[in-house]
Amino acid sequence: MRRHERRQLREIERALLATDHAWARSVFGELSGPERRRRTAARVTADLAAVTVLAIGAFTVSMPTLFAGTVLANIALCCHLGGATGRSPMPPPA
């Protein structure tokens, strides 16, 4: 992008932040406090469920339980990777 286009884009972002800060944050990837806490709780719950089921499967030597623990571990991994959007952070409000 040329310098002029980058400058115009920054002006548009500043205008969006000034007019509707919450909408701009949600659209461009920054999470609000309650949403961040909710996602963290979901990740911790998925981790604990996976570890618990894997431990139970290991102690009881139950293949179906180990399989279920492996599936839960994959779901937990997806929860962790799903939060990494790779988006650049929003500029500070004007």
Image (cartoon, rainbow, N blue to C red):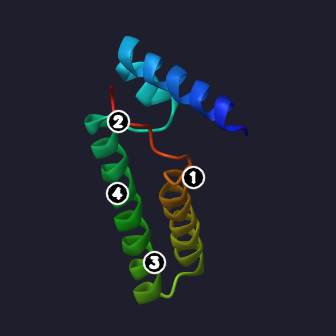
Residue corresponding to mark 1: 86
Q: Quadrant of residue 32?
A: top left
As measured in the structure, the alpha-carbon distance from the residue carrying label 2 to the one carrying label 3 is: 44 Å
Residue corresponding to mark 3: 54
Residue at 39% x, 11% y: name it. 19
In contact (CB < 8 Å): disc 4 and disc 2: no
User: Position of 47 compared to 41: left or right?
Assistant: right
Residue corresponding to mark 4: 45
Q: Earlier in the sequence, mark 1 or mark 4?
A: 4
Amino acid type assigned to the residue bearing label 1 in the image? Gly
In contact (CB < 8 Å): disc 1 and disc 2: no
Label 1: element kind:
loop
Q: Quadrant of residue 66?
A: bottom right
User: Position of 24 compared to 35: left or right?
Assistant: right
Label 4: element kind:
helix
Q: Earlier in the sequence, mark 4 or mark 2?
A: 4
As measured in the structure, the alpha-carbon distance from the residue carrying label 1 to the one carrying label 2 is: 18 Å
Q: Earlier in the sequence, mark 1 or mark 2?
A: 1
Amino acid type assigned to the residue bearing label 4 in the image? Thr
Where does the image place residue 28, in percent across and percent down from the top left? 51, 33
**What's the mark number on residue 92?**
2
The foreground one among 82 and 16 is 16
Q: Earlier in the sequence, mark 3 or mark 1?
A: 3
Label 2: element kind:
loop
Whether 52 is drawn above or below 60: the answer is: above
Where does the image place residue 54, in percent across and percent down from the top left? 45, 77
- Label 2 crowding class (10 Å Cα cut-off): few <14, some 14-19, many 20+? few
In contact (CB < 8 Å): disc 3 and disc 1: no
- Between tags 3 and 1, which lies in front? 1
User: Position of 80 compared to 48: left or right?
Assistant: right
